[in-house]
Amino acid sequence: MKLKIPESILEIDPYVPGKPIEELEREYGIRDSIKLASNENPLGPSPKAVEAVSKALLNLHRYPDGSGHDLIGKLADRVGVKPQNIVIGNGSDDIIGILATTFLRPGHEAVMPRPSFLMYDIAVKCMGAKPITVPLKNLSMDLDAMAKAVTGKTRLVFICNPNNPTGTCVSAEALESFVKQLPGHVITVVDEAYIEFARDPECGSAMKMVKDYPVAALRTFSKVYGLAGLRVGYGVMPAEMAGLVNRVRHPFNVNSLAQAGALAALEDVDYVQMTLKLVHEGLDFMFASLKEMGIKCFPTQTNFFLIDMERNADEVYRQMLKEGVIVRSMTSYGYPEYIRITVGLPEENQRLLAALKKIRG
């Protein structure tokens, strides 16, 4: 069989997620490992979300609410927009794909920072459009260079704020100034998956900009709400844009369990505060400890951070695995000596530090 595959599909580098703990334990013959590689919530899911999901199991024979009426209504109240401004997705990366499907065609371009979330590049290539990547400047997005990269062919611009994998952010003022100078035919997609963790008051959200500009602000329940396994996210955008995106969105893209869990998680304020306290205290502890060890770590506005091991990151990754600690090598992101670490529980953070001390000798 000779398939005729579009060249743009052949150019895609497949997204490689962090391996599950079970697979790595089998592969390396280890037990009781800890995973600090995928920016997950170390507290587990919200107890209220677990209870709501358990109740929703009784209705698995029914299709989910394709309109997401209750969830969208609660989100609209929470972020201060109308329901017509919200699109829900199977994780925020689903919405990235839907936006690409809606607005990109062969011959179009999409501008994005490099390195950043790998799904931007994949979503653009899936539509036969061309990704235009702009290198980071001191681990931060170079908005001036990104603005200069916009042409008459540009339809989408992706901004990850705070940025994954570097943890840096741009201010609200800089973000709005950037959007203002773009041509009217360009949509700015601002991925805010980690913004709840930001402690810098200058870290800018695009939520308020959707009233005045062609902007889509994306959020997820995978991080601060601890529902990564349910896959639910949402986008806030102008009503006209949302209407077009909803024409393309699959009607049951957010399952009934995910909707029930997300609804309950929104009400679990105590859980969110516990998460933020745990993450921020963990960051402060590990930064202080790594400084004592003489390891350079980079400031972050997320629940993860980069460290410079000053040696091959892939080798560090493998050595840490043998100690039962899963981290993420940044080689594929263009930082061959950096690893990314997710904040864990206090005992997990201690174990990571002990493993780093051991492999350094």
Image (cartoon, grey):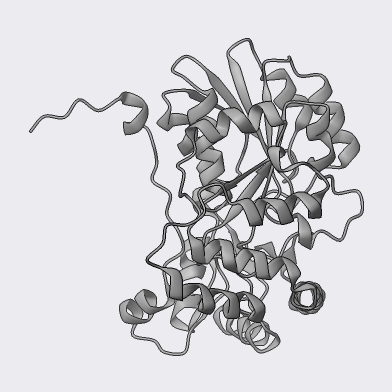
Q: Furthest-left residue in view?
A: 1
Seen in the picture, residue 34 relative to 31 is either above or below; the reply is: above
Nearer to me, 18 or 275: 275
What is the x, y in percent for residue 47? Answer: 64, 81
Q: Which residue appears at 81% of the width and 74% of the height?
A: 273
Nearer to me, 214 or 171: 214
Seen in the picture, residue 257 relative to 81 is either above or below; the reply is: below
Quarter of the image that includes the N terminus:
top left
Q: Quadrant of residue 138?
A: top right
Seen in the picture, residue 185 relative to 123 is either above or below; the reply is: above
Q: Quadrant of residue 82?
A: top right
Seen in the picture, residue 241 relative to 264 is either above or below; the reply is: above
What is the x, y in percent for residue 109? Answer: 55, 20
Nearer to me, 214 or 253: 253
What is the x, y in percent for residue 194? Answer: 71, 56
Nearer to me, 280 or 293: 280
What is the x, y in percent for residue 84? Answer: 69, 38
Residue 65 visible in image: yes
Q: Which residue appears at 32% of the width and 77% of the height?
A: 27
Quarter of the image that includes the C terminus:
bottom right
Q: Does residue 105 appear to the left or right of 85 in the view shown?
A: left
